[in-house]
Each structure stands twice: as C-alpha cells, then as structure tokens.
Image (spheres, grey):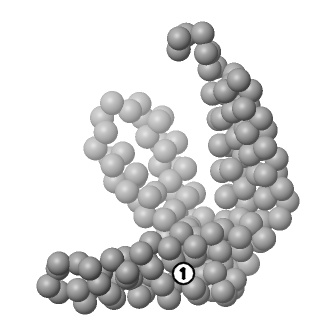
Amino acid sequence: MRRILVFLLSILTICVGYIMLTNPLETLEITSVVLGIIILIPSIILFIFTFNSIILNRFPLYMISISGIILGILLMGNEVFGVKILTILFGLHMILTSLIQMFYLKYKYFFRPISKFLSFIINGINILLGLLILFDPIFAEAFTGTYIAISVMFQGILMSIVALEYDEDKKK
C-alpha cells in the first residue's frame, strides 16, 4: 500500500514540476511567498518567546526576530522584492558553492585527472551562470524558476525510483 501511495505522490510531484516548468516566473513568485511564510512564522515565535527568556541581553534576539518579521512580510507582500532577493541569493549560492568545490577539488588526490578537469569546467560554468544571474535580471528570473521546477521534477523521479525499489516483504 505504501509503495502505491509513494508512487502516486511521485507522479503528482512530477506533474507539479512540469506545471512549474511551463510557468517559471510564477514559480519564482510562489516560491518567494512560501519562503516569506517560512521566515515569518519562526520569527514571530522567536519574538514571543524572547519575552519569557532568562537571557539578560535580549536585544540581539529582538533584532533578529524583528528583521525576520519584516523580511517575511516583504517577501510575502511584494512579489518583485521576493523575486529579486531569491535570484540574488541563488546567484551568490551558485558562485560560492562552485568556488568552494574548486578549492576542495584541488586537495583531493584520489580523483582521476579527467574527473578534476570536468569538475573544473562544470564549476567554471556554474560561476559564469551565477554572475549572469547577479547581473542580468531578466535571465535570472527565468533561469531560477526553471531550476526550481527541474529540481521538483527530479525529486518526483527519485520518489518513483524509491517506490519501485521498495519491497514491503523484506521489511517484515
């Protein structure tokens, strides 16, 4: 029964990913609203629990919670702001991740030279894409929404593989 439910959920996830892929800008707007909710709720909880805290210096906690509340409201209420923040964060993430991987790869001796070369090329492309995202806003919005949609589709594919490989008889 679980196998069937996971497989149906994976099909649903792939369909949602396809819908997201056909509308990358709307995907990015919805993602910014969801991110705003994810930031807003813990910030409100932190603000409330700071009143009951035994910490003497509560000012940093108040500043963190208030800034989180403001950021969450801005992400939820202003779609343009949310999209811009998401694309900037995504571009910075791509650049920093690729730079760290290139630095880390320098010290890994067990990789074959061709693997190091291919990884260097792929990380270089990621750095260029990250710079393009930071400095070309039109490309950034479409690319980031498309990337999120492809990621959701891959999650659905992974879930379907898990559902097909899952065997309830082995678990018992």
Q: Look at the image and tell me in which quarter the N terminus lies.
A: top right
> What crowding class fits label 1: few (fewer than 14 Cα within 10 Å), some (14-19), or many (20 or more)?
many
What is the x, y in percent for residue 146?
Answer: 73, 60
Task: Name which residue lies at 66% across and 35% down.
Answer: 159
Q: Would you name the residue on which mark 1 appears?
A: 72
Query: Residue 23 sits in which quadrant?
Result: bottom right
Q: Quadrant of residue 55?
A: bottom left
Q: Which residue is depicted at the point 65% across and 43% down?
A: 155
Amino acid at pointer 1: Gly
Q: Can you give x and y, in whole percent of width and height, for residue 71 in the image?
A: 51, 84
Residue 133 visible in the picture: no
The structure residue drawn at horizontal position 67% and vertical position 58%, both measured from the top left corner, is 148
Task: State whether residue 109 appears in this view.
Answer: yes
Q: Nearer the viewer, residue 52 or 45?
A: 52
Q: Position of residue 27 (x, y in %)?
A: 74, 66
Tell me if residue 69 comes above or below residue 87 in the rendering.
below
- Residue at 79% of width from left, 52% of height from top? 16
